[in-house]
């Protein structure tokens, strides 16, 4: 048991930090980061940055060598995700964190040969078509239809709450192939080219300021070769991908950045006044937050350690995600409390603190409470899958 | 980085948990809570035979030379079984203090016998004021003839009634550099004991030293060097109390889960209700975070790192979470666990006692607040980034 990075791991962390600082200078933030409609980074910059990650060898770093990967342990992958999240880098999304893993586990040889090299070079972006208007937490209720027609399937339906659909080259899509089936049976997974005729995208402004999307599929033809796994057997693929997703989302970089930003603010004097950090009540708040951040960090690296040992944690990934997101929300709450009268000031307002970022996150991170399972659904998963309580 | 138990550790954990759970029936554990000795001598003998008493001692003294994580796993298991033993007093408090600061002769004298289960020791640090700072030690030690004379009253001393010797922390002047440790043998003239009955069943004692004379060779380390050893004792105590809390929490969660699966109300097992499931998930979440922090604490002490931050975080978290977890466990059980013959109360009371020992949550947050204001690097840990100051 070792809670510290080895010399080689620490060197890799330093290399990644240097890369991120070089690429994401304050000037780059000013030019390409748009906390308005675009949602943090512009799609063009995100795509360009993804290619840089590919060129630096980071995207396929943890993949097996047979897929053109670097074969490095999951600890390195966890370090990369941690540092990317901390530095608020673009591109730390499904296109690098779990679609490739799901593809390697469930994809056909032809799909792997066609797509993995492109993913490795950072050339393609994905959106995940799971949620629908009638299938949110109850994902097995999805209604989008895929009907076999010769060598194709024809897909019709609507996907909702579709993050990054507007910049996606491919959809990782769940559709019902057996209309007589109940619940999680009769669902099949597809890879859908987003340039296909019949795909349209609608915009939905969010309270966080950025625009979210939904995707309509109107008789979209998908070749049978782009089906993932067996027909009607998609639920296993879908759930397997979710386990990969949760492990990636549980990265501790965000909460560590939230802590450092708040600590920096508390240690800073405004107009030569008293520093918040000299107040024992503020110290106690920071200490409580530091303990939660540390718990989040260790739990994430615990998961990575299990992965590195060749184990497949399942409910533990849900647990780690819950810990991370609840901690992030605690930072949002306590951050707003500590900012006092400045709390509601928006970016650009006179006297806005920390560029208004804490207020942005206070609204943006609302989705932590309901997305990728959400807090209550995750507790259900942990209680039933993890603790064996009856459904 | 490899935050997982290896095969040997998994085996040790399983063996220790199974031993601790079967060592004594609950009725016997309750009987021991009010006994003079506080533990079962036969169980202690077995623990010594299995090599757990001295697992983390060097082989020279009959130990197995394991790391402190292994010892934490044993302490966790004893917490999980609610198994009373003098492991904390004899090994974690006194034994390691001798290993840390004792003369070769003292180690030869005591450690091998401790390892064999033939000698018991304890350490007397706290007093009536309940503090853990150097200035809270009021007991005096002064030269007297060729030896020393001790006067004062200690409190919260574990297993003093059973111990063959007490390592007493006393002062000869006013500063932290005036603290000295002395070994006082059982039955020394001027020592009187009074039991402090307490929730959780640990045998705590008030120990009065009235003109107690000890030889010069009873001093542990050098005169005036006691505070260094005490600081390490405090870290060790807090780290292993957090391990004990994790074991207590595990047992409480396990009892709750089996009850929730079996107990039927409204025609269903109560564990199928989301209100109960969410409680259980939160208990488990808090327990796993506490467990990882606790492993990190004992690992960092075992690696010879300062461990101050890691130990304080572990004990602050476990002290807050585990008693809360036992309260929720009772809420889910309802009236059945309010009856004393149901085992949950053992853990309810042990959680209360363990959160108080070696600094409660507030104490450890105070330690962290001091690090925060005085030693930013120590507070933020080894992987810290430079603070983002571009906002100002």
Image (cartoon, coloured by chain):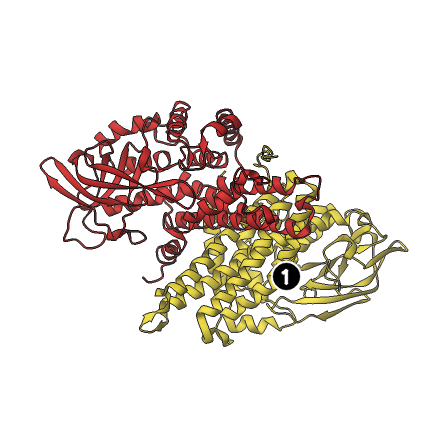
Nearest the camera: A73 or B283?
A: B283
* Residue linked to disc 1: B356
Pinpoint residue B270: horizontal percent, then vertical percent.
37, 68
Whether residue B281 is visible here, answered yes or no, is yes
Mark 1 falls on what kind of element?
helix
Left or right position of B26 against A318:
right
Quarter-of-image position of residue B373:
top right
Q: Residue furthest top?
A: A55
Closer to the camera in the image, B352 or A30: A30
Locate the C terminus of chain A by quadrant: bottom left
- Please name the residue shown 60% across and 54% down the image: B316
Q: Residue furthest left?
A: A150
| Residue at left offset 58%, top offset 41% | A353
- Please tell me which residue lies in front, B293 or B87: B293
Depicted A356 relative to depicted B203: above or below:
above
Q: Residue B220: x and y, percent?
A: 76, 50
Taking depth in this image into account, of B277 and B255 the one nearest to the observer is B277
Residue A15: x, y in percent?
50, 26
The chain in red: A
Q: Is residue B7 visible?
A: no
Q: Residue at x 58, y 37 (%)?
A: B384
Residue pushed farthest right? B145
Image mark count: 1
Task: Determine which quarter of the picture holds residue A210.
Answer: top left
On screen, residue A243 versus residue B312, left or right, reads left
Q: Quadrant of residue A268?
A: top right
> Label 1: how many residues lie within 10 Å, few (<14), some (14-19) or many (20+)?
some
> The numbered mark 1 sits on a residue in which chain?
B
- Horizontal and vertical percent position of residue A349: 55, 39
On screen, residue A207 above or below B33: above
- Residue at the far front: name it: A350
Q: Colour of chain B?
A: yellow
């Amino acid at each position: 048991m070792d809670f510290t990075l080895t010399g080689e791991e620490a060197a890799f962390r330093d290399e990644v930090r240097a890369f991120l600082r070089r690429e994401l200078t304050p000037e780059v933030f000013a030019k390409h980061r748009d906390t308005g409609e675009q949602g943090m980074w512009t799609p063009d910059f995100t795509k360009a940055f993804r290619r840089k990650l590919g060129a630096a060898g980071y995207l396929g770093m943890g993949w097996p060598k047979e897929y053109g990967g670097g074969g490095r342990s999951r600890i390195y992958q966890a370090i990369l995700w941690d540092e990317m999240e901390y530095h608020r880098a673009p591109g730390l999304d499904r296109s690098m964190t779990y679609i490739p893993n799901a593809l390697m586990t469930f994809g056909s040889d032809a799909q792997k040969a066609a797509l993995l090299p492109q993913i490795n070079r950072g050339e393609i972006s994905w959106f995940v078509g799971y949620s629908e208007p009638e299938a949110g937490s109850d994902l097995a209720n999805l209604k989008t239809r895929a009907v076999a027609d010769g060598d194709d399937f024809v897909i019709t339906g609507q996907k909702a709450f579709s993050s990054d659909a507007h910049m996606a080259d491919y959809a990782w899509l769940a559709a019902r192939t057996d209309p007589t089936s109940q619940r999680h049976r009769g669902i099949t997974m597809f890879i859908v080219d987003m340039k296909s005729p019949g795909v349209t995208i609608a915009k939905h402004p969010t309270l966080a300021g950025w625009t979210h999307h939904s995707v309509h599929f109107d008789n979209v033809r998908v070749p049978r070769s782009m089906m993932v796994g067996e027909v009607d057997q998609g639920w296993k693929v879908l759930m397997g991908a979710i386990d990969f997703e949760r492990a990636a989302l549980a990265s501790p970089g965000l909460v560590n950045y939230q802590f450092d930003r708040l600590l920096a603010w508390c240690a800073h004097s405004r107009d030569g006044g008293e520093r918040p950090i000299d107040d024992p009540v503020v110290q106690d708040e920071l200490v409580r937050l530091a303990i939660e951040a540390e718990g989040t960090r260790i739990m994430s690296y615990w998961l990575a350690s299990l992965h590195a040992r060749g184990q497949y944690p399942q409910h533990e990934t849900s647990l780690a995600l819950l810990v991370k997101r609840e901690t992030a929300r605690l930072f949002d709450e306590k951050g707003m409390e500590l900012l006092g009268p400045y709390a509601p000031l928006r970016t650009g307002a006179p006297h806005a603190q920390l560029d208004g970022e804490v207020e942005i996150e206070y609204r943006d991170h609302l989705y932590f409470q309901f997305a990728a399972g959400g807090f209550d659904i995750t507790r259900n998963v942990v209680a039933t899958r993890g603790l064996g309580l009856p459904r | 980085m490899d935050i997982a138990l290896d095969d040997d550790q998994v085996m040790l954990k399983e063996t220790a948990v199974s031993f601790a759970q079967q060592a004594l029936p609950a009725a016997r554990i309750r009987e021991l809570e009010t006994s003079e000795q506080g533990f079962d001598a036969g169980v202690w003998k077995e623990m010594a035979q299995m090599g757990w008493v001295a697992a983390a001692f060097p082989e020279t003294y009959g130990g197995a030379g394991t790391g402190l994580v292994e010892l934490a796993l044993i302490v966790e298991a004893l917490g999980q079984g609610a198994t009373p033993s003098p492991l904390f007093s004899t090994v974690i408090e006194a034994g390691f203090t001798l290993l840390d600061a004792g003369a070769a002769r003292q180690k030869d004298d005591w450690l091998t016998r401790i390892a064999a289960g033939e000698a018991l020791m304890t350490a007397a640090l706290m007093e009536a004021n309940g503090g853990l700072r150097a200035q809270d030690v009021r007991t005096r030690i002064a030269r007297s003839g060729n030896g020393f004379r001790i006067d004062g009253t200690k409190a919260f001393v574990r297993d003093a009634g059973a111990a063959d010797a007490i390592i007493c922390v006393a002062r000869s002047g006013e500063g932290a550099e005036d603290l000295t440790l002395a070994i006082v043998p059982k039955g020394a003239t001027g020592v009187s004991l009074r039991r402090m009955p307490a929730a959780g069943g640990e045998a705590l004692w008030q120990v009065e030293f009235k003109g107690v004379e000890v030889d010069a060779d009873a001093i542990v380390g050098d005169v005036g060097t006691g505070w260094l050893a005490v600081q390490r004792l405090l870290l060790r105590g807090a780290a292993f109390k957090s391990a004990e809390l994790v074991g207590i929490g595990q047992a409480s969660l396990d009892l709750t889960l089996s009850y929730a699966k079996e107990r039927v109300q409204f025609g269903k097992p109560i564990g199928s209700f989301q209100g109960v499931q969410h409680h259980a998930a939160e208990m488990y979440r808090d327990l796993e975070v506490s467990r990882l922090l606790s492993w990190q604490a004992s690992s960092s002490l075992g690696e010879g790192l300062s461990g101050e931050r890691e130990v304080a975080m572990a004990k602050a978290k476990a002290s807050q979470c585990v008693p809360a977890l036992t309260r929720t466990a009772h809420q889910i059980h309802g009236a059945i666990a309010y009856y004393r013959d149901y085992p949950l109360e053992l853990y309810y009371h042990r959680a209360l006692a363990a959160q108080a020992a070696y600094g409660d949550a507030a104490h450890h947050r105070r330690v962290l607040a001091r690090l925060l204001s005085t030693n930013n690097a120590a507070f933020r840990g080894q992987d810290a980034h430079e603070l983002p100051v571009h906002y100002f």
